[in-house]
Image: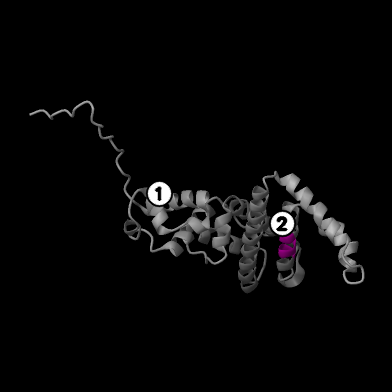
Amino acid sequence: MSEQPSPPWRTRPRSRAPRQPLSQQAVVDAALAVLSREGLGGLSMRRVAQELGTGPASLYAHVSGREELLELLVDRVSADITVPEPDPGRWTEQVREVARQAYRVYAAHTELALASLATIPTGPNALRVTDGLLAVLRSGGVPAQQAAWFLDRLFLYIAGDAYEGALYAEKVRAAGQDQPTWWARMREQLSTYYRNLPAGRYPHLREHVDVLLAGDGDTRFEFGLDLLIQGIATHVPGGSDRSRAG
């Protein structure tokens, strides 16, 4: 018997695309979409479940909770960071290259820069980057303990710098201005304020206001990176040529 047709004045049910089966990768993809639109404060298991068109309980078969989800997200974006094969003659420049990559990744995912500040690398991509950098440092003669502490400080610096940049970007957006205009106005206001400070109390701030306000974010990031790399190079025993920062 053929199916009876519905009267033409009734709304016909729309056919739905078959739901994709849930997986950890699908959960992470949905979480990254939520994070990009709503920020870290808007990320929750319930919100990710809504993004996937399912209930929160179904997510727990793939992710234990928000903390693990953040770890997976940090690991996902770490996939974009490549680490070269160690070259003892270029180890400082290799560290610099990887640090720049990590900075670009965190600058593109600033909410994850904040999340990474309390995340120990455990995923395959984060572990690959950490292990690769450790190999580069050890190839240059950096002792194991100092190399380990350096990596901790290096990624703290990168994430903190990227997140600070995001906070300034939010101020620019809130002001409804483009970035060059906002920064030019801010520098002008700060310059005026510093120059009008009491001379007897803040003589050095008044004298050096121009250098205090000089340099953009990229220039300052490179300066900090130089300090870190040159500092770890001093721990190479013997002060050989390979310990010189590239």
Q: How many marks?
A: 2
Q: Quarter holding the N terminus?
A: top left
- Name the residue that disc number 2 marks: 221
Q: What percent of the width, then of the height, locates residue 107?
A: 62, 52
Query: For this view, does 93 lie left or right of residue 187?
Result: left
- Corner quadrant of residue 245: bottom right
Residue at 86% from the left image edge and 59% from the top image edge: 209
**Is residue 226 located in the magenta-colored stretch of the structure?**
yes
56 to 5, vertically: above or below:
below
Residue count near mark 2 (Cα–Cα under 10 Å), binned few <14, some 14–19, many ≥20: some
* Marks 2 & 1, CB-CB < 8 Å contact: no
Residue at 40% from the left image edge and 49% from the top image edge: 51
Residue at 62% from the left image edge and 60% from the top image edge: 159
The amino acid at mark 1 is Glu
Spot the residue most to the front.
9
Residue count near mark 1 (Cα–Cα under 10 Å), binned few <14, some 14–19, many ≥20: some
Spot the residue most to the bottom.
145
Q: What percent of the width, then of the height, locates residue 103?
A: 63, 54
Q: What percent of the width, then of the height, locates residue 123?
A: 47, 60
Q: Earlier in the sequence, mark 2 or mark 1?
A: 1
Q: Is residue 149 visible?
A: yes
User: Which range is magenta?
Assistant: 224-230
Tell which of 28 and 85 is nearer to you.
Answer: 28
Q: What percent of the width, then of the height, locates residue 135?
A: 59, 62
The amino acid at mark 2 is Phe
Residue at 29% from the left image edge and 41% from the top image edge: 18
Q: Quarter holding the C terminus?
A: bottom right
Instruction: Please tell me whether the stretch drawn in magenta is mainly helix, strand or loop.
Output: helix
- Name the residue that disc number 1 marks: 51
